[in-house]
């Protein structure tokens, strides 16, 4: 598995900001859901009956982790309980993430739960992007939302896009890196049409691009020199510097769109690939049970002994599933692994990967991945290793530092 092409991410939001709608759209664009309709009214396709729709919707939401593909990368989307401040459940789900999208409402801005989830993410060093949703709503103001992200969350947040059109007339976005205009096309906005920036937005786009580059040059001396020398800065350099600053949890690029109106969700997925870390760009460690207080650094290397954590157990029509993140080593179908808490040996007879409403049976999975194990007897938070008494991941309330990039 090419770890550089894996993203383990979560979506956090204040209730009602559109986390569910955005997740559905992401799954839809990645080809996992083929028809979409808002069950609360407003959608367009009448192609599915209500039961089918409820089923699909329900599964999308309850699935603790779902895998999708975007432009050659595998994205594991992990459900994060965002509204409770500090619980073992939150701790576990945040440990499993390598990065996150913070969804904000374009009218409500930074609300109480946005502050809670942001605090959690800081505690666990989760790099993040922000997405201002509901750009079609009356009273939407992305500029004020970015100000709030800076003031209320203390983040170095910068707009990477500008809106084209306002409220009901929100049409698309200007990408300040490519300096192009992006519009969605098709009944569900399946395709992106790229055009020149509308003439009346050019000046504003130049101004905001300059602000974006100024902010980024604080993380990149060569960019700073180019800025001072008024030299051209390539998209490649912008991506690289942004990635570096985001992964170090120093910087929050801000995107915008309307999940409900199928606008500008794909550029957000591009940003996930471009700016959020892969599993080999974050550090994870566990407790060494042989020595009190000693931490062991885990390596996302399939040839090392297995260290995996069952972070969520669900029991539904599919039977019992233990959603598992593999931090080191490899899990194989039919393999026997040691529960580090109970000391018992457990056979992993069936492994699955969840794709919203579908299960894919798999034979093996490697470090960096998230899968589900069927029918094993364990408790949420249990660590499994290929060796007895090897490592424990539970009760680690300290965040691991993100690797510093050179
Ligand atoms: P969650 O609580 O964060 O999961 O939010 P939901 O996805 O359930 O959305 C809450 C409400 O906002 C629903 O009625 C959605 O249809 C609506 N909604 C979601 N995204 C948008 C959007 O982009 N624009 C508008 N106008 N409404 C939206």
Image: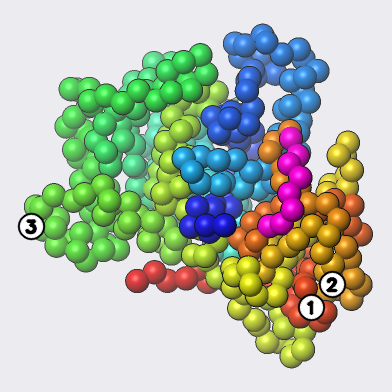
Residue 298: x %, y % from top left: 62, 74
As rendered, which of 161 and 373 lies closer to the eye? 373
Side (left or right) of 381 relative to 328: right
Residue marked by disc 1: 387
The residues bearing labels 2 and 1 have C-alpha atoms spaced at a distance of 6 Å
Name the mark on residue 338.
2
Indicate the secondary structure of the residue bearing disc 2. Answer: strand
**Residue shown at 7%/57% (left/top)?**
229
The answer to whether residue 16 is visible is: no
In the displayed structure, does residue 358 sit left or right of residue 296?
right
Tag 2–tag 1 contact (CB < 8 Å): yes
As drawn, the label of residue 229 is 3
Of label 3 and label 1, which has the lower sequence position? 3
Residue 125 appears in the picture as rendered: yes
Tag in front: 2 or 3: 2
**Which residue is more in the foreground, 290 or 79?**
290
Residue 364 is inside the magenta segment: yes
Which label's residue is closer to the chain start, 2 or 1? 2
Mark 2 surroundings within 10 Å by alpha-carbon count, few (fewer than 14), some (14 through 19), many (20 or more): many
Q: Quadrant of the C terminus?
A: bottom left
Answer with mark 2 or mark 3, whichever residue precedes in sequence: 3
Q: Quadrant of ligand 1?
A: top right
């Amino acid at each position: 598995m090419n770890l550089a092409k894996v993203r383990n991410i979560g979506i956090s939001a204040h209730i009602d900001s559109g986390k569910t709608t955005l997740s559905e759209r992401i799954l839809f664009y990645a080809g996992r859901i083929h028809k979409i309709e808002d069950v609360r009214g407003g959608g367009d396709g009448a192609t599915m009956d209500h039961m089918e729709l409820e089923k699909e919707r329900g599964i999308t939401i309850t699935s603790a982790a779902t895998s999708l593909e975007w432009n050659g990368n595998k994205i594991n989307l992990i459900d994060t309980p965002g509204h409770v401040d500090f619980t073992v459940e939150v701790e576990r789900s945040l440990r499993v993430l390598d990065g996150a999208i913070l969804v904000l409402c374009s009218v409500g801005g930074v609300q109480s739960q946005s502050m809670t989830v942001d605090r959690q993410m800081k505690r666990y060093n989760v790099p993040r992007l922000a997405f201002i949703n509901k750009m079609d709503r009356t009273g939407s103001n992305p500029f004020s939302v970015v100000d709030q992200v800076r003031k209320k969350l203390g983040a170095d947040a910068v707009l990477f896009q500008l809106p084209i059109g306002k409220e009901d007339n929100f049409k698309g976005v200007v990408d300040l890196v490519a300096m192009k205009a992006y519009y969605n096309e098709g009944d569900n906005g399946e395709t992106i049409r790229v055009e020149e920036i509308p003439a009346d937005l050019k000046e504003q786009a130049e101004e905001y691009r300059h602000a974006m580059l100024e902010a980024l040059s604080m993380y990149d001396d060569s960019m700073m020199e180019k800025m001072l020398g008024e030299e051209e800065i390539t998209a490649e350099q912008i991506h690289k510097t942004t990635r570096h600053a985001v992964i170090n949890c120093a910087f929050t690029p801000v995107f915008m769109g309307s999940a409900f109106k199928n606008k500008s969700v794909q550029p957000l997925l591009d940003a996930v690939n471009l700016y959020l870390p892969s599993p080999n760009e974050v550090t994870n460690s566990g407790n060494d049970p042989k020595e009190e207080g000693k931490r062991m650094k885990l390596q996302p290397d399939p040839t090392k002994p297995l260290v995996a954590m069952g972070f969520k157990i669900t029991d539904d029509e599919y039977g019992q599933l233990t959603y598992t993140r593999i931090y080191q080593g490899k899990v194989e179908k039919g393999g026997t692994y040691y529960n580090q808490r109970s000391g018992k040996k457990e056979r992993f007879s069936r492994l699955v990967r969840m794709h919203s409403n579908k299960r894919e049976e798999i034979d093996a999975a490697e470090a960096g991945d998230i899968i589900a194990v069927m029918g094993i007897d364990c408790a949420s938070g249990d660590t499994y290793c290929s060796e007895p008494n090897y490592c424990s991941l539970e009760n680690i309330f300290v965040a691991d530092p993100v690797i510093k990039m050179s």
